[in-house]
Image (spheres, helix red, strand yellow):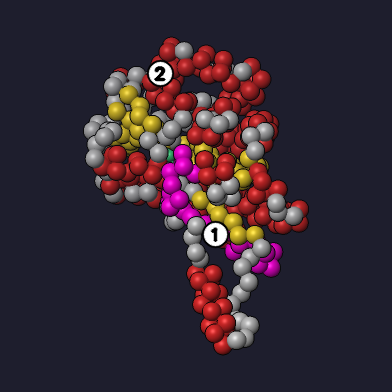
Amino acid sequence: MTINRRRFVQTLAGSAALAAGVRPAFGQPAAEFQMKWANNIPATHPSTIRVKEAADKIKAETKGRVDIQVFPNNQLGSDTDMLSQIRSGAIDFFPLSGLILQTLVPVAAINGVAFAFKDYATVWAAMDGDLGAFVRETVGKTGLHSFDRQLDNGYRQITSSTKPIATPDDLKGFKIRVPPSPLWTSLFKALGASPTSINFSETYSALQTKVVEGQENALSLLEIAKLYEVQKYVSMTDHMWDGQWVLANGKSWASLPKDLQAIVTRNVTAAVLAQREDMAKLNVGVEATLKQKGMIFNYPDKTAFRAVLTKAGFYEEWKGKFGAEAWAKLEKYSGKLG
Ligand code: X2X
């Protein structure tokens, strides 16, 4: 348990007052609902900045009744740790990639099917629309609450410290870090690579010590998490769009009175929408910035990667796993896959 500064001050004030035989004259009461929000992303990322703003607004609008403390950058543990903490109630809010949530909610990985969404307009139509609603309904059955909108984590590109990935052949035996998720592992196995599941909290050091040669993430995160320091090449494959569902512990969410829930929901939604705009702005200049840092870019023919996946049976396999209903909702936005 963490003792926050205010409690410490209150304790001091309390003991001083006791010593003087009077009630404490200063020190604020602790908030009625002290809640924890934890994530895997640096403090300087829009996902953290916007949530901190939302927490301030929530505190003001609830007149101090709801106090959300934000713990960015895996301070409370890896995604795997935080997923068990959000389930037990050790943390109250946690944005998590649908693909990592897959270990608990299988269909949550569906947006990770490779090359599914041709652009952001299609992503938001699907994920703010019926495909996302289908996933959220399933999340709701697991004892977690999911807010409606996903944070943008971006289109993912393959990076490497050893060589550019120009064709699917370059992935043969390529040692690549993937987040802990069956779909991610399956995707890179189908492409012929050697994927290893590593939480984001361990990714920088795994790349630095060359436990793996490469990883895949959005350009914005390469910059913000400084992965350019330990990676040289960026291959613009756009192989997947990833977003984070904002999850809440079901019991702790239910313990908030309806009027407070409404204030939290409104501010979280506004934060997510602002985060999406921030990401769109970041995406404009980030390639040039990474080039300035010394990264070397190439632009592979994406259809070649997609053809390898089809041949390897990737789409057939996942169509079977997600089931016909979910797959039909996906193909409504992606067109025919495989
Ligand atoms: O773990 C990752 O690579 C990250 C930060 O992109 C996710 O949250 C999936």
Q: Nearer the viewer, residue 239 or 3?
A: 3
Q: Which residue is drawn at 60% across and 60% down?
A: 34
| Alpha carbon separation for disc pair 2 and 1 | 41 Å
Q: Name the residue under label 1.
A: 69
Instruction: Give the residue at the far right of this rendering.
Output: 258
Residue 215 point in image, percent of width and height: 35, 35
Location of residue 145 by image quarter? top right
Amino acid at the residue labelled 2: Ala
Q: Residue at x 46, y 53 (%)?
A: 72
The circle drawn on residue 190 is 2
Crowding near pointer 2: few (<14 within 10 Å), some, many (20+)?
Answer: some
- The part of the chain drawn in magenta is 56-82
In the drawing, does residue 259 fall left or right of residue 329? right
- Can you tell me whether the CB of the residue at mark 2 lies under 8 Å from the nearest atom of ligand 1? no
Residue 104 point in image, percent of width and height: 56, 31
Residue 169 painted magenta? no
